[in-house]
Image (cartoon, coloured by chain):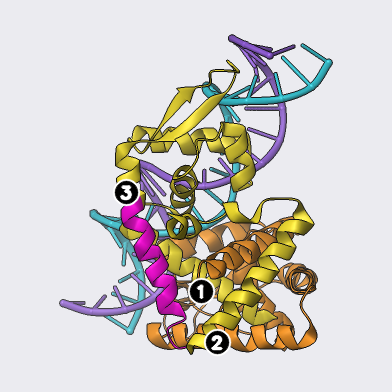
Chain colours: A yellow, B orange, C purple, D cyan
DNA sequence: TATTGTTATACTCTATAACTATA
DNA sequence: TATAGTTATAGAGTATAACAATA
């Protein structure tokens, strides 16, 4: 299954490349993607992104400095902070998401529609099995996902 | 094709996780994997890894400090340097490669053999098309590839 | 002149450990 | 005591620009 590793590298590289044209790293893009339809706490983000809390603090710091997100006090727990997309942040991710999706589409442009469909089904199955195995929610992981939801 | 992005993240995360158990980053693992059957110059590595020369200098510096690789003067061009795997480096990658491959295998364990085969074929096709499009050699990109060759 | 590689610099991403404030 | 988040610190990875040595 070496092809799978190569595929992952190719997709990853494509996403890095396109995110960069929007002045985003992949992690920043995922962060903004997650925030499109929710305002999680730092700890929740830490779970979504599978990162240490302190890493998320830094990530949010940098995004906040750039005016992409803001911190909002929680009403029910004064220790907690909710991270919220700003108007600017929403504009940035709304612009970036289609081009990210487009780059993926370009990657599989050589496949026939039915092959694309089969690949999609198999990929979903692998992702679902992996998420189940690790006890996490499989929907939360890519800005492209949220792009298609919206 | 959002599933493809999610798949890429899942595979990538799995490789990061396993490489870490061998005290390697993904890039270090790819570097060692490439060096298994060749001794490229810095510029050649830069092409294989799609990184700037200066990034490769740093990568090789760190690997050299850890005794995994060494620099060897080129015989024909005194500007060039060939990067060579040390005995230690070979031991490390020979140990890591099977566990990396094993983790990929685990990821697709839920699929039937014929589904795995189909996924492999589709993945190879996408990778090949992408490599062709970008004018690079598709074989050079993962330590797992070299693991299976050896 | 052009190419090979390094250095200087700066930034992002990441984690661990220690800390503060709240629960 | 336990949890939420931050800070301090350290290190890897990355790129750009300027440079020396060689072609």
Query: Where is mark 3, residue-wise?
Result: A92
Taking depth in this image into account, of A132 and A57 the one nearest to the observer is A132
Q: At 47% across and 68% down in the image, what residue appears?
A: A13
Other residues around mark 1 within 10 Å, as few (<14) / some (14–19) / many (≥20): many
Query: Where is mark 1, residue-wise?
Result: A10
Alpha-carbon distance for marks 1 and 3?
Answer: 24 Å
Return the x and y of residue D17 as percentages of the image width and height: 24, 55
Whether residue A25 is visible: yes
The reply to whether the magenta stretch includes residue A97 is: yes
Alpha-carbon distance for marks 2 and 3?
Answer: 32 Å
Q: Quadrant of the C terminus of chain A?
A: bottom left
Taking depth in this image into account, of D6 and A125 the one nearest to the observer is A125
Other residues around mark 2 within 10 Å, as few (<14) / some (14–19) / many (≥20): some
Which of discs 2 and 1 lies nearer the camera? The answer is 2
Dot placed on the residue nearer the N-terminal end, 1 or 3: 1
Tell me which corner region of the image, top left, top right, bottom left or bottom right, holds residue A103.
bottom left
Tell me which corner region of the image, top left, top right, bottom left or bottom right, holds residue B60.
bottom right
> Disc 1 sits on a residue from what chain?
A
In this rendering, the count of numbered labels is 3
Which of discs 2 and 3 lies nearer the camera? The answer is 2
Return the x and y of residue A116 as percentages of the image width and height: 52, 82
Most common SS among magenta residues:
helix
Query: Where is mark 2, residue-wise?
Result: A115
Dot placed on the residue nearer the N-terminal end, 2 or 1: 1
Tell me which corner region of the image, top left, top right, bottom left or bottom right, holds residue B142.
bottom right
Q: Which residues are magenta?
A: A94-111
């Amino acid at each position: 299954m070496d092809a799978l590793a190569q595929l992952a590298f190719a997709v990853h590289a494509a996403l890095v490349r396109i995110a960069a044209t929007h002045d985003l790293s992949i992690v920043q893009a995922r962060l903004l993607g997650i925030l499109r339809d929710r305002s999680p706490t730092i700890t929740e983000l830490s779970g979504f992104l599978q990162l240490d809390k302190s890493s998320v603090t830094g990530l949010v710091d940098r995004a906040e400095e750039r005016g992409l997100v803001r911190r909002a006090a929680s009403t029910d727990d004064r220790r907690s902070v909710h991270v919220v997309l700003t108007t600017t942040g929403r504009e940035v991710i709304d612009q970036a998401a289609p081009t990210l999706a487009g780059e993926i589409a370009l990657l599989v442009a050589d496949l026939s529609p039915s092959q694309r469909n089969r690949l999609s089904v198999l990929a979903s199955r692998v992702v679902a099995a992996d998420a189940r195995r690790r006890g996490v929610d499989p929907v939360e992981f890519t800005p492209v996902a949220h792009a298609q939801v919206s």
